Image (tube, helix red, strand yellow):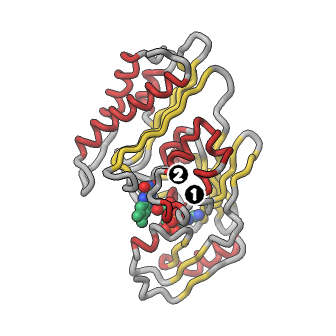
Amino acid sequence: MFDQVDAYHRPRSIREAVRLLHAGGSRARILAGGTDVIVQSDPSIRSLVDITQLGLSYIRKAGNAWAIGATTTMAELEDSAPIRGLAGGILAMAAAACGPVQLRNMATLGGNLANASPAADTAAPLLALDASVVLAGASRRRRVPLAEFFSAPGKTVLGKELLVEILVPAPPRGGRWGWSFLKLGRTESDISLVSVAAGLQLDARGTCKSARIALGAVAPVPLRAAGAEAILMGQKPTLARIAQACERVARDVSPVTDVRAPAEYRREMAGVLAGRALRDCAQQAGVTL
Ligand SMILES: Cc1cc2nc3c(=O)[nH]c(=O)nc-3n(C[C@H](O)[C@H](O)[C@H](O)COP(=O)(O)OP(=O)(O)OC[C@H]3O[C@@H](n4cnc5c(N)ncnc54)[C@H](O)[C@@H]3O)c2cc1C
């Protein structure tokens, strides 16, 4: 493992980390918790840039949003009172579902997103929450909506940049919200076959002011189910309407067959899980189904 690595850097500033990334060219790799980097053991890597000493482990309020530092671990997220209180705790639940506890003590939120697995468990809740990521390059910082961050399995829009922060806006006030996160895996600590995060905001008449459905592991990148959301918007979330939205979810996903499950099973379960999540949201928002 890593026989070819000849330099291990532990920079003390973001600027230095980015400089080391540039200096190492295509053979340099950022190392956060290492739970993906070590398992992948890419033999082309020559230098590792450890970013765990950059002061990027924090959860703090930033105006109307929560700012989460990239090296915040899954364990820190699942234990955080503000994250447990945000949107029914869907991000905390997803963090708690990321593998066994030993892993969650190491694995970081930034690493989960930058690794760009279609099955990354924190992606669906963050997409449902309209999160964005802050990327730091040599000369500037840019903010990218998470919906535009993933480009293909294992690929993102990151250049020679560091993902430094995840910004999660507080959901709009008013009406009644319900939220849900569900994960289907072969075992409790395996990665997802399907994950779903959903949120419904109902107005005083019980119609959907906001409908958010995001899925993981059922397409080349984690995605929002925009077609299904449109079916719910402005409507009462009845069982029939939810069923219609779930049929649309199952139609719109494009899963692959792999060692864990066939594509058709994932497609069907995407609809099933979306249905459970939406019914859960509707009931939390006061609807009797
Ligand atoms: C046994 C096991 C079980 C797992 N179970 C799950 C699971 O249930 N759900 C799940 O979602 N994942 C799971 N994973 C995958 C992994 O643990 C997560 O993706 C984890 O969050 C990765 O974070 P890390 O800090 O360890 O990333 P690292 O391994 O350090 O890095 C991952 C990738 O992202 C890059 N990177 C890291 N941080 C940054 C940054 N700030 N800016 C730019 N690039 C960066 C690295 O260069 C690397 O390419 C599992 C892994 C193992 C080994």
- Residue 92 in picture, x, y percent from top left: 56, 47
Instruction: Return the mark for residue 75.
Output: 1
Instruction: Tell me the kind of residue under disc 1.
Output: Ala
- Residue 235 in picture, x, y percent from top left: 48, 15
Residue 39, relative to residue 251: is it above or below?
below
Query: Image point 25% across, 55% down: which residue?
Result: 258
Which badge, 1 or 2, is on the more N-terminal residue?
1
Query: Image point 37% across, 35% down: which residue?
Result: 273
Residue 111, relative to residue 19: is it above or below?
above
**Left or right side of 194 for 209:** right
**Can residue 168 be seen in the rendering of this structure?**
yes
Report how far apart the C-alphas of labels 1 and 2 lie in the structure. Answer: 7 Å
Secondary structure beneath disc 2? helix
Distance from mark 2 CB to nearest ligand 1 atom below 8 Å: no
Instruction: Return the mark for residue 287.
Output: none
Which of these two is toward me, 88 or 126?
88
- Residue 37 in picture, x, y percent from top left: 46, 71
**Left or right side of 26 for 168:** right
Which of these two is toward me, 94 or 3?
94
Residue 58, relative to residue 193: is it above or below?
below
Q: Which residue is mark 2?
A: 95
Distance from mark 1 CB to nearest ligand 1 atom below 8 Å: no
- Residue 152 in picture, x, y percent from top left: 40, 55
Which of these two is toward me, 119 or 226?
119
- Mark 1 burial class by Cα count in 10 Å: few <14, some 14-19, many 20+: many
Check the picture and name the quadrant holding the C terminus: top left
**Left or right side of 135 for 190:** left
Query: Image point 22% across, 48% down: which residue?
Result: 262
Determine contact: label 1, label 2, CB under 8 Å. yes
Instruction: Tell me the kind of residue under disc 2.
Output: Ala
Secondary structure beneath disc 1? helix
Which of these two is toward me, 281 or 188?
188
